[in-house]
Amino acid sequence: MRLSERMKPVCLSFVVRLIDTYTAGPPSDPDLKVSVSDTICRQPVKKPDGLYVLTDLPPTGTYTVTVRSARYLPETISVDMNALNPIEPVVCVALIPHPAYPFSNQATLLRAAIKDASGQPAAGADMQAFFTDDLHARARLAQEVKEGSCTIRLSGLTGRIAEGDAFLFKEKHEEAGEAEVFRIAQLLDEPRSFVLDRPLQHSYHRGTLLLPVVTAHSDERGEIVLPFRSCNAKQFDLRLEYSYRGQHFSQQVTVTEGKTTYLGSIYCG
């Protein structure tokens, strides 16, 4: 029997694309590990362009994608085979830099050490940084979007919007209320059109602003870093919201472009 006759055809199941949320490009860690599992652990095939390819999986069911790296916080997501685009089954995973990430000396960073009420490191505390000035809006809605929508079309873009970027909607001249944070999951072929990582929970008017959001969570030592890829001012004000074990806290902070702002120890409790 010829070799070609013995070889089975390969069936593409899905592709994992990793996005560094700081650079908006592929991850920089050459030792990064990706695994996919259901009842058994499977190793995807890494391609030269950085994509991870899974083949010959059962066409139904849910799989868990796990990413481990010394430069990024651990990430685990679930992939529902029934929800994938059958033409382009690509899953984007946004990777948040670890406090040990090799930032440049000119990076704009916010660092803190999160501690519990007893002063011990608080691992897994979540933090979000919201820009308080509308001047930092990256775009606005070109048309109204309804609750449940997963796609948006934008106008007035200032700078690049990339897969993995996080935003919230804010009506012009109104205070940002309950923040609905989402990430850009895919760039569509239609100009200035994007797929979101989840259905919207509210409807929004045309002209609603998109304000960037930077998110992170503390590592096993309680350390946390929030990097800012692009800044529209030498200094800017942020509203920080952080949570730990069901408790929620907030504070205002001013960050300087090209510098590291140290908040010291933040006690949650």
Image: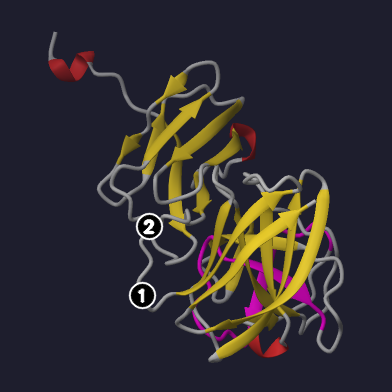
> Residue at left 59%, top 51%?
218
Q: Nearer the viewer, mark 1 or mark 2?
A: 1
Furthest residue toward top: 1
> Residue at left 72%, top 87%?
134
> Residue at left 58%, top 39%?
77
Quarter holding residue 251: bottom right
> Residue at left 82%, top 50%?
247
The residue lying toward the viewer, choosing from 19 and 88, is 19
- Asked if the stretch drawn in magenta spans residue 75, the answer is no
Quarter holding residue 170: bottom right
Against 257, residue 246 (above or below) is above
Q: Which residues are magenta?
A: 147-171
Q: Which residue is mark 2?
A: 26
Against 55, residue 193 (above or below) is below
Residue 101, x across and y down, in percent? 40, 57
Few, some or many residues within 10 Å of mark 2 (<14, 14–19, 20+): some
Residue 240's disc number: none
Against 94, residue 189 (above or below) is below
Q: Which residue is mark 1?
A: 105
The residue lying toward the viewer, choosing from 215 and 24, is 215
Residue 8, x across and y down, in percent? 30, 19
Residue 87, x across and y down, in percent? 50, 45
Side of 132 relative to 4 (left or right) = right
The amino acid at mark 2 is Pro
- Asked if the stretch drawn in magenta spans residue 163, the answer is yes
